[in-house]
Amino acid sequence: MSSHHEHNAVIREQFGKQAEGYARLMRDSPNPLLPKLVDAVKPTAGDRVLDVGCGPGRLSLTLAELTGHVTGIDLTPEMLAQAKAQQAERGIENVEWLQGDILPMPFENEKFTLVVTQATFHHFADPAAVLKEMIRVCATGGRIVVIDLTPDPLKVESFDAMEKLRDPSHVHAWPAADLRKLGAAAGLEELAFHQYGTEMPIEAVLASSAVPDPGVLDKLRALYRADATSGENKIGMSLREQNGEVFATYPMTMAAWRRQ
């Protein structure tokens, strides 16, 4: 089995176990990025959208309300089941879901006018190859958006170590400058580049995780709380404690480009 397929198996195992918890976390979390995303790519009723690694479908369903049609592709059937449930609950009809790999993607060249992905790049062993596929299936003049974790480059090693402990499918979170260079190297025209933070209670994050060993959960809690108490931000999550509860602010970046 190739390393790509071996890692896919890890992703399927992890997200199969955490699909329900992750979907709940996404439903309960605000989406402050949406106005900036809309402003950057200006979705219209004529757009054909692809959401790469769509997970429980939050971004797909949001864009479906603004565009003509959305296709969500994901490796994990359990995640797609959550997406379909959300679709039925919201009564949205212009979305279809596909279970499958993204290297390569099962679509012809230039099929979509808007290609997006959120919270996926840190799971990929070769993000540049994924971006190349996103470009291939995007029409000339179309838009491409990558939204992902982007820790401080001085703290990325500690950040990655914590995330791998919590989720073995995590590979590497690219700092924002590296993500920006990735788009430039691919010949994309930058439309927007927005860095922001998403704060979440650590217990909600852990509840959505498929941590295999209960002892690991206790270790993670101790490490998060120690960083919050010290105020040193060694992990790069700007951890803080309030009324006995620990909160993490995940550093994120939205990069929007146009395919030329």
Image: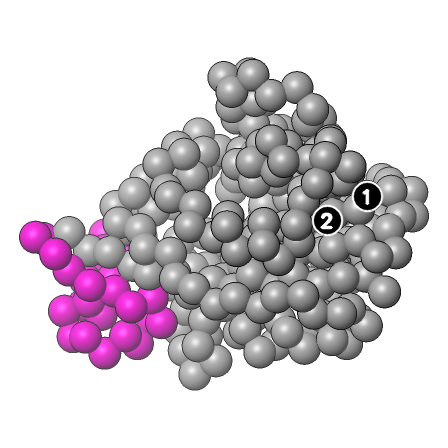
Residue under the point 66% across and 19% down? 93
Look at label 2 and name its amino acid: Val
Q: Which mark is residue 115?
A: 2
Position of 228 with respect to 196 (left or right) is left
| Residue 30 falls in image quadrant | top left
Residue under the point 50% across and 50% down? 35
**Rendered position, 89 above or below 154:** above
The number of discs equals 2
Q: Position of residue 126 (x, y in %)?
A: 71, 63
Disc 1 on helix, strand or loop?
strand
On-image quarter of the C terminus: bottom right
Position of 249 with respect to 8 (left or right) is left
The magenta region covers 217-244
Q: Position of residue 60 (x, y in %)?
A: 61, 36
Residue at mark 1: 112
Look at label 1 and name its amino acid: Phe
Q: CA distance from mark 1 to mark 2?
A: 7 Å
